[in-house]
Image: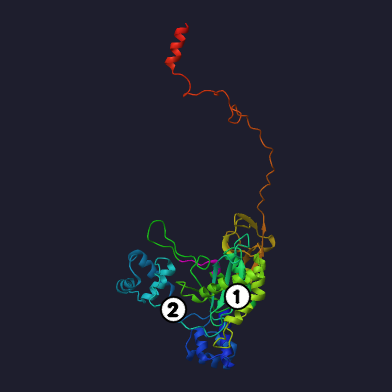
């Protein structure tokens, strides 16, 4: 059975075989040499579609090192060379313990064992101007613009999520209420259903698209870079996610927003749009066609690099909030502060205390994936009781009548006579 990556490679090879795509363009899309493209096309003509499957698939390598050797090397490293680098440790293992292996093999074993942390590679290339991609769907730039699009005519602010093709300037955009992962996934689903899967998306380094490293306390050590929900969804769809290191790197979508903040704002004003629904209607029915007519350009190649959605690719499952949860003894999982029950019909032997994939879908439902099946769940946590309004409690009346007491009326220290005057008058009177 072919994997999705092999199906994508086979599509490009068929384009080359039919003469719709040059060997150089195919090599750039597949990330291989032109010579290998010619060899793959020859194999496809000779063997058929199964030629894209590697001949050693499913067979163990004859040059692999044994598990005993791997265990010995890792144990000696933990006992004697815990603070050594892989290069120096490989030399000591070969000299002292007769364990001969390359430094990169040892590095890989140590990383998998969790005793060595891989250091990120530094970027040594200088950012230079790059030409447009040749095919539609090779690279799509994706970003959000926060602007007063309706010029104060709407009670709530709206944001614009835009995707622009690098080769053709074809624009796909939607107005949303909030710049959240859920809204981005809804826009992404509409794009995929309309155009298919592009080869790559080009975004900034915002938290929606990648989990940025953070410092641990007051130390200089940083946490590892993680994968966001959008990054996970694109990985499952076979779409590459490229992060720009500066606004200039994704200049096409940045310049697009500059134009939209001029033309689109005025168009919405002329159309009299006052709500997000009206703005999206104008954007879909009028503006996008005007944009393509005014700013669109033909690509260098007629081949469309968009790939169709596979039969096994479930957008409802992929475009959801996914986390791993442990199944409790009563076959329940916790999610978002609530308890969800797995149906008895879906219970399998050994399901207790195992980790399962929980999907919080865009429609609000929660499903648990057991094997290849997504099982719907029911919320079994009791709802909070509604609070009945209580009659107002009568408070004690204040003795000063709300600040209007009269017991100090006509008492003034400035106007009353001094005490010695009052005492002399009392003596004379006596």
Magenta residues? Answer: 225-230
Left-right relation of 383 to 251: right
Residue that label 2 marks? 64
Q: Secondary structure at mark 2?
A: loop
Quadrant in which residue 71 is drawn: bottom left
326 or 416: nearer the viewer: 416
Q: Position of residue 405 (x, y in %)?
A: 58, 26
Picture layout, residue 362 above or below residue 167? above
- The reply to whether callout 2 and callout 1 are in contact (CB within 8 Å) is no
Quadrant in which residue 3 is drawn: bottom right
380 or 405: nearer the viewer: 405
119 or 192: nearer the viewer: 192
Looking at the figure, which quarter contains the N terminus? bottom right
Q: Earlier in the sequence, mark 2 or mark 1?
A: 2
Nearest-to-viewer mark from 2 and 1: 1
Does the rendering let one see residue 320?
no
Residue that label 1 marks? 172
Distance in Å between CA atoms under marks 2 and 1: 49 Å
């Amino acid at each position: 059975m072919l994997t999705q990556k092999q199906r994508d490679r086979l599509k490009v090879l068929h384009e080359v075989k039919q003469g719709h795509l040059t060997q150089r363009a195919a090599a750039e899309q597949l990330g291989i040499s032109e010579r290998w493209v010619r060899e793959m096309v020859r194999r496809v003509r000779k063997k058929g579609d199964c030629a894209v499957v590697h001949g050693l698939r499913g067979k163990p390598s004859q040059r692999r090192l044994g598990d005993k050797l791997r265990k010995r090397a890792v144990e000696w490293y933990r006992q004697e060379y815990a603070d050594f680098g892989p290069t120096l440790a490989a030399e000591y293992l070969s000299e002292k313990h007769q364990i001969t292996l390359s430094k990169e093999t040892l590095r890989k074993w140590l990383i998998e064992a969790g005793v060595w942390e891989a250091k990120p590679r530094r970027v040594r290339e200088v950012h230079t101007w790059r030409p447009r991609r040749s095919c539609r769907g090779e690279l799509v730039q994706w970003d959000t613009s926060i602007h007063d699009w309706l010029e104060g005519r709407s009670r709530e602010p709206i944001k614009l999520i835009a995707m622009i093709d690098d080769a053709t300037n074809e624009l796909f955009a939607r107005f949303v209420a909030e710049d959240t992962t859920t809204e981005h996934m809804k826009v992404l689903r509409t794009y995929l259903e309309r155009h298919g899967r592009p080869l790559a998306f080009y975004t900034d380094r915002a938290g929606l698209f990648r989990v940025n490293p953070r410092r641990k306390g007051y130390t200089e050590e940083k946490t590892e870079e993680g994968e966001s929900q959008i990054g996970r969804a694109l990985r499952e769809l076979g779409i590459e996610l490229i992060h720009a290191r500066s606004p200039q790197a994704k200049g096409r979508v940045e310049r697009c927003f500059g134009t939209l903040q001029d033309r689109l704002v005025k168009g919405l004003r002329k159309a009299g749009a006052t709500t997000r629904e009206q703005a999206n209607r104008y954007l879909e029915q009028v503006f996008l066609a005007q944009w393509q007519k005014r700013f669109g350009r033909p690509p260098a190649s007629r081949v469309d690099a968009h790939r169709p959605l596979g039969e096994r690719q479930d957008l409802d499952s992929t475009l959801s909030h996914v986390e791993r949860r442990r199944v409790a003894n009563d076959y329940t999982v916790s999610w978002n502060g609530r308890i969800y029950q797995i149906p008895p019909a879906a219970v399998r032997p050994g399901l207790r205390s195992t980790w399962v994939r929980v999907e919080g879908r865009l429609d609000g439902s929660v499903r648990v994936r057991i094997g290849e099946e997504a099982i719907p769940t029911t919320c079994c946590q009791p709802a909070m009781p509604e609070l009945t309004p209580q009659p107002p409690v009568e408070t004690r009346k204040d003795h000063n009548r709300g600040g209007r007491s009269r017991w100090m009326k006509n008492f003034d220290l400035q106007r009353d006579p001094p005490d010695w005057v009052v005492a002399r008058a009392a003596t004379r009177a006596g």
